[in-house]
Image (spheres, rainbow, N blue to C red):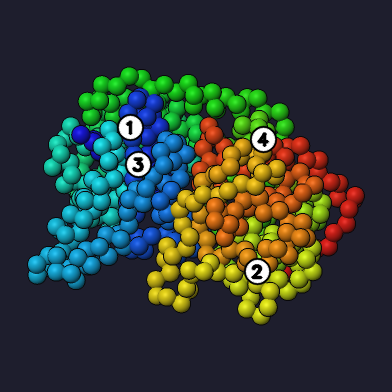
Amino acid sequence: MTKYIFVTGGVVSGLGKGITSASLGNLLKARGLSVINQKLDPYINVDPDTMNPFQHGEVFVTEDGATTDLDLGHYERFTGVNLRKDANVTTGSIYRKVIESERKGDYLGATVQVIPHITDEIKRRIKATANDVDIQITEIGGTVGDIEILPFLEAARQIRKELGQENVMFIHVTLVPYIGPSTEMKTKPTQHSVSVLRSSGISPDVIVLRSDRDLNDEIKSKVSSFCDVSFDDIISAPDLDDIYEVPLKMHDEGLDKSVDTRLNLSTNKPDMKKWKNMLELKTEVKKTVEIAILGKYFGLPDSYLSVVESLNHASLHNKVNLNLHWEDSDNFNIEDLNKFNGVVIPGGFGYRGIEGKIAAIEILRKQKIPFLGICLGMQCAVIEYARNECGIKDANSSEFSQNTNNLVIDLLPNQNLGKDDIGASMRLGTYPCKIKEGTLTSRIYNDEIIYERHRHRYEVNNKFKEELEKAGLIFSGMSPDNNLIEMIEVKDHPFFIASQFHPEFKSRPWEPAPMFNHFIEAASNHKKINKNDTKVQKVKD
């Protein structure tokens, strides 16, 4: 029988419930248990597919094509478990299902209410994810006291009542702030959030105390006393330099031991040797690489979260220190590109900043600076090549311009942006890609067929494929039916590779995504060009 752990948060959002949940999954897997993670999101959007990255951060794509919250990326990177679309549940998806059922008459004319109809659907979604695993960890988004999460809390309370205290537990993540003038750590916010949680009928079994520093036993004892939770179940979770150190800290604090005892698991101590060995690679760092991300979503650092983590994974395994630079494609000095060992142009949507990206790609290609393009980054690279090597000066994408006869990038054949429901309407999920022999890409992947995750509506227009190939552009990856161009590269370049898919979604700290790994390797071998050695024009977007 699956046992359930619910992770709630208090005081403020962004405390790290996702990292706590992911770290716990890591520890329980290391104890030999099968684990699955789930995220309940209280927003009314059906999914995050159409949400602004400035507000919500990146959209993470699962193997089966679900567009989900970025916390699912943390879960996968910490546990190595590929999640399904049922691992992310939103208020919007719950209400849509219930309303559809009501319209079909499934409730036989009953008055449809939050309790029991909404909570019953939430419980069904929670239990449907388990799939006979030993432990399911379900993070409830938002903070206790938010009106939006009350149905989720009620559903979780009912599950504990139905399955029994020995099969369900609650972990509460809360803030202990440091007040500078008084030089004190304050526990009142924690006490208050626990009180609010109890008003929903839920008493936490474990409290995780987030702070900017390690907490002493006095603080932990105070929280234990006022919140009526055992001292051994009070976990100090200070800020750490590396999020991948969190599982080790949680283990030292006894989080996995508390879970083992509370749920009567009787497991052995976790085997963290592989994880520790990975982290010890940091002690072998020999040099620093200067890597730029050229994009437009810089209002929230999490907008490119999986890309950043993939660069971190690759840097760790190449034993180099990553110095990351954020360059706004709307406003940057193109001469600065020579300062970097490599440049990444990630995915995105819309026309803003496109001409800046295209101008940058021309320099990266001609100056032989390592370049990695992802999704939109590949599309911009194709436009650049068409303009400057094929002589198609008005080459563009139908996403950016309709005032050209040369749409080298166009909608996929099955796309219709005029329809009412555009959410999750793109080419989504894992698809195969056939690798061309004798290419740099083939050496990177060392396989004939690879499987990568996608999220896009536009593709290279096959009408221009022959012309681009004649001009020297290499299509190093294709769909097995040869209808879709998946990857490009150019010859006589240390690393100029771009993909329509998103390799960042499959990168793991112990196994970096191959494209990122070889990009960082090329970047670490690239000698930056002195600014005085070459002159290039400033970009005007």
At a point 23% along the width and 67% down the height, the residue shown is 100
Direction from residue 130 to residue 414 in the image, left or right = right
Q: Give the mark nearer the N terminus: 2 vs 3.
A: 3
Label 1 and label 2: CA atoms lie apart by: 49 Å
- SS state under label 1: loop
At a point 29% along the width and 50% down the height, the residue shown is 144
Q: Amino acid at mark 2?
A: Lys
Q: Residue furthest front?
A: 481
Q: Which of pointers 2 and 3 indicates the residue nearer the eye? A: 2
Q: Which of pointers 4 and 2 indicates the residue nearer the eye? A: 2
Picture coordinates of residue 423 (x, y %)? 42, 66
Which residue bears the numbered disc 2?
A: 463
At a point 67% along the width and 38% down the height, the residue shown is 443
- In depth, the one of 416 and 201 nearer the eye is 416
Q: Which of pointers 4 and 3 indicates the residue nearer the eye? A: 3
- In depth, the one of 191 and 200 nearer the eye is 200
- SS state under label 3: strand
- SS state under label 2: helix
Label 1 and label 4: CA atoms lie apart by: 34 Å
- In depth, the one of 257 and 317 nearer the eye is 317
Q: Are marks 1 and 2 in contact (CB under 8 Å)?
A: no
Picture coordinates of residue 97 (x, y %)? 25, 62
Label 2 and label 3: CA atoms lie apart by: 44 Å
Picture coordinates of residue 68 (x, y %)? 41, 54
Residue 503, disc: none
At a point 18% along the width and 69% down the height, the residue shown is 104
Q: Residues within 10 Å of mark 3 (few under 14, many from 20)?
A: many
Which residue bears the numbered disc 4?
A: 321
